[in-house]
Amino acid sequence: MPRESKRAKRERATEICRRMGELYPHVESALNFTTPFTMVICVLLSAQTTDVAVNKVTPELFSRWPDAEHMAQANPAEIAEVIRSIGFYRTKSVHCVEASQMILSEFGGEVPRTMKELTRLPGVGRKTANIVLNKAFGIVEGIAVDTHVFRLATRWKLTNKPTPLQAEQDLLDIIPQELWEPVNEQWIHFGRDTCRAQNPLCDGCPLADICPSFGKANGNPKPRASKTARTKRA
């Protein structure tokens, strides 16, 4: 099979985004949040955990500690008890308190609105910051590459990079900037509905004619970073 030119890859990536827009024209976040602060905490908690699991613990969490001022004074052990059903709950409980304290002490109680400032918060990496900027503030600075997006981008041969962070840079290079905003949510939905990690539904796939892995997708590519490292800097 001849090597795909960068121009052809860009055209294919653009067509993928167009079709995703037709499939999921009004996609929204599966996480339940009401403010930029609750958005930060929700996405922080969602690392290595399903959105459904996060939504089960956040009602009690935010009823007890609804904002940065309250959560900054919380005992991490108490938060851990509330969120113990999700993965890495002890580490995440500490990050919740430390991030809240930094929001108060360094950002006047307001969630910062830049990538540089957001990624200073404990437990917040580029993926989390991309989602917060996008969903909470309408700022599109990049593409949040989570497990689903990384798997699909690899299967579609839009990247061959070994980590989500590196894969994002490939996607930013080949997807027009005006199409970045819905990529994460649309690809997540497609990854759950059709292009699953195991037993993807290739028959009838709306991307069959432009998918290099059609009929032979074989599981979820795994980043080289350890689970602990990914959780700490999601």
Image: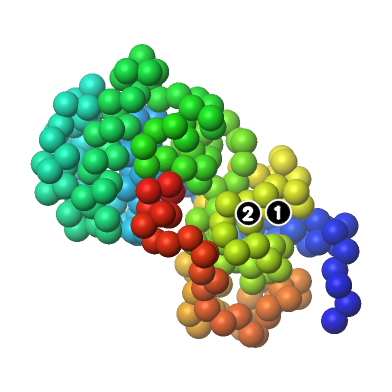
The amino acid beneath tag 1 is Asp
Task: Name the secondary structure under disc 1.
Answer: helix
Tell me if mark 1 has few (under 14), some (14-19) or many (20+) residues whose alpha carbon lies within 10 angstroms of its own: some
Task: Identify residue for label 1.
Answer: 170
* Residue 202 in the image: above or below residue 60: below
Quick one: quadrant of the N terminus? bottom right
> Dividing the picture into quarters, in which one does residue 72 lie?
top left
Q: Which mark is residue 185?
A: none
| Side (left or right) of 94 relative to 223 | left
Left or right, 33 with reference to 226: left
- Tell me if mark 2 has few (under 14), some (14-19) or many (20+) residues whose alpha carbon lies within 10 angstroms of its own: some
Residue under numbered circle 2: 166
Of residue 98 and residue 186, the one placed in the foreground of this image is 98
Residue nearest the viewer, comparing 162 with 208: 162
Front residue of 105/36: it is 105
**Could you tell me if the residues under marks 2 and 1 are in contact, i.e. CB atoms within 8 Å?**
yes
Q: Is residue 43 left or right of residue 116?
A: left
Instruction: Kindly identify the residue that appears in the image at 50 percent across and 46 percent down.
Output: 127
- 2 or 1: mark nearer the eye: 2
Q: Secondary structure at mark 2?
A: helix
Residue at 21% in and 36% down: 62
Q: Marks 2 and 1, Cα distance to the nearest angstrom?
A: 7 Å
The percent position of residue 84, horizontal first and vertical second, equals 17, 54
Which residue is depicted at the point 36% across and 14% down? 108
Q: Residue at x 45, y 24 (%)?
A: 112
Residue 116: x and y, percent? 53, 30
Residue 168 at what x, y percent from top left?
Answer: 63, 51
Q: How many marks?
A: 2
Three-letter residue code for mark 2: Gln
User: Does residue 190 show up?
Assistant: no
Residue 200 location in percent, x, y?
54, 79
